[in-house]
Amino acid sequence: MTFPERAAEIDLDALRHNIRHLRDVAHPARVMAVVKADAYGHGAVPVARAAVEAGAAWLGVAHVSEGVALRKAGIEAPILAWLHTSGTDFTAGVEHGLDLGISGWELEHVVASARELERPAIVHLKIDTGLGRNGCPPDRWDALLARAVEYQEAGLIRVVGIFSHLAVADEPARPETDLQVQAFREAVAAAESAGIDVEVRHLANTPATFSRPDCHFDLVRVGLGIYGLSPFSDQGSADLGLQPVMTFSTVVSNCKEVPAGQGVSYGYAYRTHKPTTLGLIPVGYGDGVPRIATGAPVLVGNRIHPVVGRIAMDQLVIDFGTTGLVDTPDSPLGKRAVLFGAADSPAVEDWAAAAQTINYEIVTRISDRVERVYLEAPREESADGYA
């Protein structure tokens, strides 16, 4: 297989493995695969299809426009969109059969769209249990429930879910999660008392799916985990039974021997300590590589070499730490360079540490200039001709 000059290889079989593993962890709760932000940079449509094939019962997106794009790609699974603005096309959301998260003000807009289309909107009511972002404040919850029941009895909406989001589940020892779980249980009880027949209660994100089975309820919303990455600082992907899905690679585009004291890249933030060979890697912050990730690892051949000097828009430099490579059979020129990925590649977390950020951001920010290459094993056809 010939790879492009810059590639984010997306292993859909690894993704399917992660979905199946998360289904086992969450059982009997079902799994919502979160594919917002172009599936965390992995490609929303192919990832969504693979996730549903592997048993994800729902898909989750932030914006209605993301859900509509999945519908236009032919994906029929339930899709929840939960982050709206006054400019959101709620009519498109209702028309394409999306489930819509409601924190309060959106309800009237959704009802107006339902009236226009003469079909009920499917909604999930969101309670703010302590995160302080989206969600209905607890002191307004009863009023939201009353309005929702009124509209449901009028045939304008159908309330199928109650949900919230956790703030510190990636730090399992913190007590705030207990408080959020209790607040969520109280919100669900209030909804049931108001006459809402709740079909799905969902609170758990990836870290709570692994560490808090009491948060599973009917449905877990997993984002980072389906991409094979760990949300915990003290556990890696393998510790959780996950397989990283994205491998980001390119080729060494130039290499040259330089003397001691050679300045490297803008500002001369790095100078060589001895005669050495520098390698040019043709990706930079224009491709989503964090500009501040000096020291991050790049694998060439079977050795890891550090990024030196400032990362530029289109390129970065690595130091091979030795001389005598140029114009020899051992020259790294043209060899594959892996920034992060699966198997023996550097970990996404190593790049996150160098960039002082989290693994979520590293994969999500890889730009469209990096071609996505989807990998999966050939499927065997069954007797009826279907894979």
Image (spheres, grey):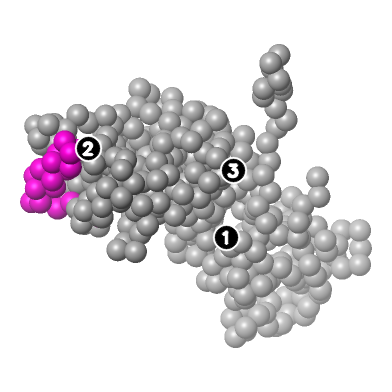
Residue 122: quarter of image:
top left
Q: Residue at x 18, y 39 (%)?
A: 154
**Region of the chain picked out in magenta, as a range:** 134-155
Instruction: Tell me whether the residue at label 3 lies in contact with that at label 2, contact meaning CB atoms closer than 8 angstroms.
Output: no
Residue 135 vs 173, above or below: the answer is: below
Q: Nearer the viewer, residue 33 or 105?
A: 105
Q: Nearer the viewer, residue 32 or 168?
A: 32
Image coordinates of residue 249 in percent, x first then y, are 69, 55
Q: Residues within 10 Å of mark 2 (few under 14, many from 20)?
A: some
Residue 151 vs 271, above or below: the answer is: above
Magenta segment's dominant SS is helix
Left or right, 189 with reference to 313:
left
Image coordinates of residue 382 in percent, x first then y, are 69, 17
> Which quadrant does the N terminus fall into?
top right
Disc with the residue nearer the chain's start (3 vs 2): 3
Q: Residues within 10 Å of mark 3 (few under 14, many from 20)?
A: some
Quickly name the residue at label 1. 366
Residue 265 vs 161, above or below: the answer is: below
Q: Secondary structure at mark 2?
A: loop
Quickly name the residue at label 2. 155
